[in-house]
């Protein structure tokens, strides 16, 4: 007598097991994907807030330097050339460790990017490794800066709506109206 044949063992997954695994993956993706998208937005908001902090600190430091020097010109040449007049008036310069910064009523000026003469708030804030950055230098670091008269608008590159992922710096308008930094607009980040 021959022994009864046993069916060969089958390996693999049943249809039910595959459906359950696919369902679990779908639920995880539905929960995790919005969080990953929110991380990109959070990163842009953090970068914008960091830039605003740098601009605010630079404005305060330049203003403090001019107040401390009491309008007296520097007796020595600045590290990269030129002498700062430290004027608290309508136009002046102050020496920083990287070079001269143009000032208006003892706050950094809103100047062209890159500045043909002495750079202003963009350079003072140190958002790039280049002291007097070009627009390309700023873009390489993820920033955009737009000058319109006395106002410099700082934006974050790659934001879905850059016009609503920004803040502005308005240079001092008089001896009694200091430079103003707007609140950040993050609605388009």
Image (cartoon, rainbow, N blue to C red):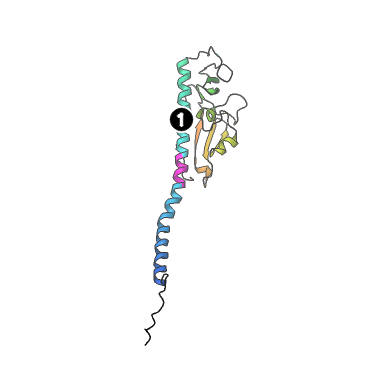
Q: Residue at x 46, y 18 (%)?
A: 67
Return the residue nearer the eye: 64 or 127: 127
Picture layout, residue 24 above or below residue 187: below
Picture layout, residue 107 above or below residue 158: above
> Residue 128: x and y, percent?
53, 33
Q: Residue at x 45, y 42 (%)?
A: 45
Q: SS of the residue at dot 1?
A: helix
- Point out the image quarter for the N terminus: bottom left
Furthest toward the front, the residue is 1
Mark yes or no: residue 182 visible.
no
- Label 1, on which residue? 56
Q: Residue at x 54, y 13 (%)?
A: 76
Furthest toward the top, the residue is 75
Q: Is residue 42 magenta?
A: yes
Span colored in magenta:
40-46
> Residue 146: x and y, percent?
57, 36
Mark yes or no: residue 54 visible.
yes
Q: Is residue 22 magenta?
A: no
Return the residue nearer the eye: 163 or 159: 159
Return the residue nearer the eye: 49 or 127: 127
Q: Quadrant of residue 149?
A: top right
């Amino acid at each position: 007598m021959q022994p009864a044949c046993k069916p060969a063992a089958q390996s693999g997954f049943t249809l039910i097991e595959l459906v359950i695994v696919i369902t679990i993956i779908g639920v995880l993706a539905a929960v995790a994907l919005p969080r990953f998208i929110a991380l990109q937005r959070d990163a842009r908001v953090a970068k914008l807030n960091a830039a605003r902090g740098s601009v605010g600190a630079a404005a305060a430091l330049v203003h403090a330097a001019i107040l401390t020097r009491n309008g007296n010109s520097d007796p020595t040449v600045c590290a990269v050339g030129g002498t700062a007049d430290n004027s608290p008036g309508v136009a002046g310069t102050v020496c920083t460790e990287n070079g001269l910064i143009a000032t208006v009523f003892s706050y950094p000026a809103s100047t062209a990017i890159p500045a043909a003469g002495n750079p202003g708030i963009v350079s003072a804030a140190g958002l790039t490794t280049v002291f007097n950055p070009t627009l390309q230098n700023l873009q390489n670091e993820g920033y955009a800066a737009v000058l319109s008269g006395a106002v410099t608008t700082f934006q974050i590159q790659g934001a879905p709506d850059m016009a609503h992922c920004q803040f502005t710096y308005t240079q001092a308008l008089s001896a009694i109206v200091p430079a103003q930094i707007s609140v950040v607009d993050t609605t388009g980040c």
